[in-house]
Image (tube, grey):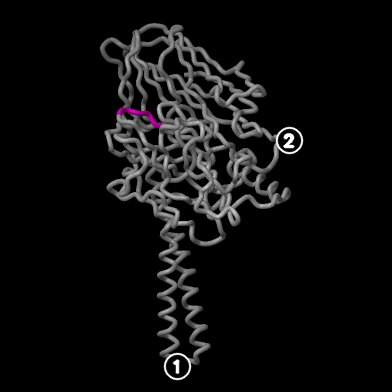
Amino acid sequence: MNWAWLRALGLQAAPYEIAAHPLGRRSRQVLSEDYYAKRRRRIRIRPWTRSVRLGSAGPDVETRRPRGSGLLILESDFLGPITEHEDTRPFTPVVLIDGEPAATGFGRGLIALEPGDHLVQIQAGASAGYFPVSMRPNGYVWLSSFVPQRLDATLRGADFLRQFPMAPTQAVPRRLSHLIDMPVSTAAFFLGAFAGIAATTALDLSTWIAAAGMGIFATASALAAQQLTFLAHRAAVARAERRLARPLPPAIHAPQPFPGGSWRLIDPQDRAVPQGSEGMAVLRLCLTFDQTPHRQEPHLPNTAPIDMTARIGEEYPRRLRPSIFGPKLQDEKRDARRAAKRRRQFGEAYPPEARPWVDAPLVAVDGEPVPAVWGINEYRLSPGEHQITVVVPPPPEVLTGDATEIALDDANGEYSADLRTDRPAVLNGMARIEMTPAESGWELSRYSASFTLEP
């Protein structure tokens, strides 16, 4: 995987690791393959806390999933480098299962799913990828999702959504595990030590010089191996990103009938031109949103309400000693520097307790509600003129409080579409949404949106 987010956060990476969303369904088990955050400043990234081991044939240990449930093995990955910008939007992913938050963060996670058909969606400071999952009892499905730090908000429709590739994991070249650097460096250290012993023995040097030579050889070999491993990581990530830049296999979504027509989702990778059939016309409604950067809140503190050494949605790991890894003494200047850097890199001074998400848009055809999600919606309707109405939804009720400021006066659009069987119609809708968490981290202090709808 691309570990740019982990290298950028270092010791403060724990709340950005994939974990259960704290407002998700409690009956939906979410596990992660690993704890990624470095608790100490060492090369190793805590491989001894591995909770679930995965192989190419699936999990090789039994997880605590409900009986009969399947497993969605989701790689929540990152595209490109982490750079610093003043207008960075919050882009940490939120994983939605059938419209409900299930997980949040980066890394490889395992989500228990009941058998049946599901829609997996990603929101990452914008409407991102989505993919259908058909889960068998006790089966498993591998998916990989990618989000960039920066995006082009001037794009519309499928071009906007293609900035967030999502595909079966087998369609993407494998990336190296972050656990590989430690064994490679260790092996190179001992090989370097043996090489040093052989060289100094052949030169018949004194004991102290021989010991120093052995140490130099061993250390140089370990450092060289670490750098070569880092370059191998970069090469594997670059190869995967080159593959993602080319067309990926499109997913096929099943149509759903409603009175007067039908609806189905279209994969952003599906470039086929829609055709009318059976006397029905085609309307493609491409709905996307982009989250604006958080406003500067001078009255908010620079320290997070959560424990920065624990993952969101999980209890403090009991296997760690709080005396070593517990909260440190507050340093206001240090916290302010770290908060400013996180704002430039990750779009937020600190991660909220409950990362917000946006509910599905509200769409009506001739005044009648029809199904819709953030993505490419294809409707098959009778030919003729139809009035299309799109409304940005209010924030989820669980994210609102008495002090939440909601401004949705410009969060809707209407369009009169003349549909014909021989000419598909395409409408692009873009919402600009502001979601600023309150100081508690559980609710929003502000939610506002504007919306445009045009051909």
| Main secondary-structure element of the magenta-colored stretch | strand
Q: Position of 405 compared to 25: left or right?
A: right
The quarter holding residue 194 reads: bottom left
Disc 2 to disc 1, C-alpha distance: 70 Å
Instruction: Name above or below for residue 363 compared with residue 43.
Output: above
The quarter holding residue 129 reads: top left
Q: Which residues are magenta?
A: 116-120
Amino acid type, residue under disc 2 in the picture: His
Q: Secondary structure at mark 2?
A: loop
**Closest to the observer, 455 or 328:** 328
Name the residue located 36 percent from the left edge and 38 percent from the top edge: 65
Task: Pinpoint residue 412: horizontal percent, then vertical percent.
Answer: 54, 16
Mark 1 Cα-neighbour bin, 10 Å: few <14, some 14–19, many ≥20: few
Q: Secondary structure at mark 1?
A: loop
Task: Pinpoint residue 396: horizontal percent, then vertical percent.
Answer: 53, 23
The residue under label 1 is 204
Instruction: Name above or below for residue 436 compared with residue 452.
Output: below
Amino acid type, residue under disc 1 in the picture: Asp
Mark 2 Cα-neighbour bin, 10 Å: few <14, some 14–19, many ≥20: few
**Closest to the observer, 305 or 316:** 316
Image marks 2 and 1: residues in contact by CB distance under 8 Å: no
The residue under label 2 is 299
**Closest to the observer, 73 or 367:** 73
The quarter holding residue 300 reads: top right
Task: Pinpoint residue 101: horizontal percent, then vertical percent.
Answer: 47, 31
Question: Is residue 185 found inside the magenta-colored segment of the image?
Answer: no
Name the residue located 27 percent from the left edge and 33 percent from the top edge: 136
Name the residue located 32 percent from the left edge and 45 percent from the top edge: 62
Can I make out residue 161 in this image? no
